[in-house]
Image (cartoon, rainbow, N blue to C red):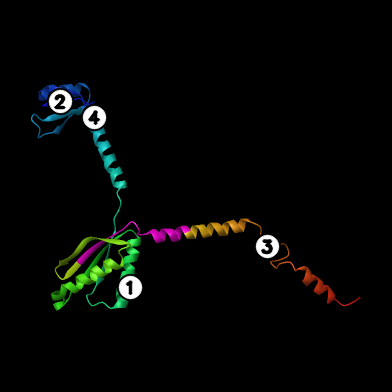
């Protein structure tokens, strides 16, 4: 076998006994890392430490994976305009949540003979939400259903983030007003002008 030391140094071709003796002499393990090579490649290492490091790397990779949620909306090929607008609103909401949307057209009976109507409906929906969603899977007929997959664009969620920022700024402005000067002593009423004071004094009875 071809033997590699723990620091990556090539030690040349060794018999199995020589390689095992070398590894055990360093209180390490002999691990085959390329069984298909000719001759096979083995490495001297601390196998327990190696497995631990691999598990930590895998755990870190899973932690940084972005979870993609897929929502589903079902439509009928003869959907009314009101229902269509409602369904479209759901699609917009899902895309703004950075979720993918699986849009399914359900055919019944002979409706399947006019699958082009379902395709037209899906393409109309994609056009209506093109600012927020992009077609990741073109309309595809699967049995009695036609399916299209939409994915969020970079613009998706932007309006929601802007609203959150506006709300935060408004809250900060209210807090700033509360920390400033309050109403003048004696109540919230504004002080009277000089003309109003003079008029009030003229109306007082003589005495």
- Local packing at callout 4 (Cα closer than 10 Å; few below 14, some 14-19, many 20+) is some
Q: Is residue 9 visible?
A: yes
Residue at label 2?
Answer: 3
User: SS class of the residue under badge 1?
Assistant: helix
- Dot 4 falls on a residue whose secondary structure is loop
Q: Nearer the viewer, residue 58 or 68?
A: 68
Give left or right: position of 148 versus 154: left
Say if 199 sits above or below 2 in the image.
below
Coordinates of residue 83 in the picture (x, y in percent): 30, 76
N-terminal label among 2 and 1: 2
For the magenta stretch, what is the residue range?
147-165
Rendered location of residue 199, percent (x, y): 80, 74
Residue at x 33%, y 68% (from the top left corner): 90
- CA gap, disc 3 and disc 1: 48 Å
**CB within 8 Å, label 4 to label 1:** no
**At 17% across and 72% down in the image, what residue appears?**
116
Instruction: Identify the residue under disc 3.
Output: 183
Task: Give the image location of residue 3, x and y in percent.
Answer: 15, 25
Q: Nearer the viewer, mark 2 or mark 3?
A: 3
- Taking the spot 14% from the left edge, 78% from the top edge, the residue there is 110
Q: Please name the residue that numbered disc 1 is placed on.
A: 86
Dividing the picture into quadrants, the one containing residue 29 is top left
Q: Residues within 10 Å of mark 2 (few under 14, many from 20)?
A: many
Q: In front: 1, or 190?
A: 190
What is the quadrant of the C terminus in the image? bottom right
Other-residue count near label 1 (Cα within 10 Å), few / some / many at <14 / 14–19 / ≥20? few
**Circle 4 is placed at which residue position?**
46
Residue 106 in sight in this render: no
Q: Counting residues from the N terminus, which is met first, the one under dot 4 or under dot 1?
A: 4
User: How far, Cα to Cα, is label 2 from label 4?
Assistant: 15 Å
The mark nearer the N terminus, 3 or 1, is 1
């Amino acid at each position: 076998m071809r033997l590699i030391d723990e620091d990556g140094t090539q030690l040349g071709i060794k018999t199995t006994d020589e390689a095992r003796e070398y590894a055990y002499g360093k209180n390490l393990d002999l691990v085959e890392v390329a069984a298909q090579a000719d001759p096979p490649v083995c490495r001297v290492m601390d196998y327990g430490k190696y497995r631990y490091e691999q598990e930590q790397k895998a755990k870190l990779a899973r932690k940084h994976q972005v979870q993609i949620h897929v929502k589903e909306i079902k439509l009928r090929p003869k959907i009314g305009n009101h229902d269509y607008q409602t369904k479209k609103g759901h699609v917009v909401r899902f895309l703004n949540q950075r979720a993918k949307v699986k849009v399914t057209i359900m055919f019944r009976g002979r409706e399947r003979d006019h699958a082009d109507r379902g395709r037209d409906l899906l393409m109309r929906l994609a056009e209506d939400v093109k600012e927020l969603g992009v077609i990741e899977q073109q309309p595809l007929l699967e049995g009695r259903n036609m399916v299209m997959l939409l994915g969020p664009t970079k613009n998706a969620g932007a309006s929601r983030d802007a609203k959150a920022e506006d709300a935060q700024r408004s809250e900060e402005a209210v807090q700033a007003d509360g920390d400033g000067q309050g109403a003048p002593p004696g109540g919230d009423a504004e002080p009277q002008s000089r003309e109003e004071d003079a008029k009030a004094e003229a109306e007082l009875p003589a005495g």
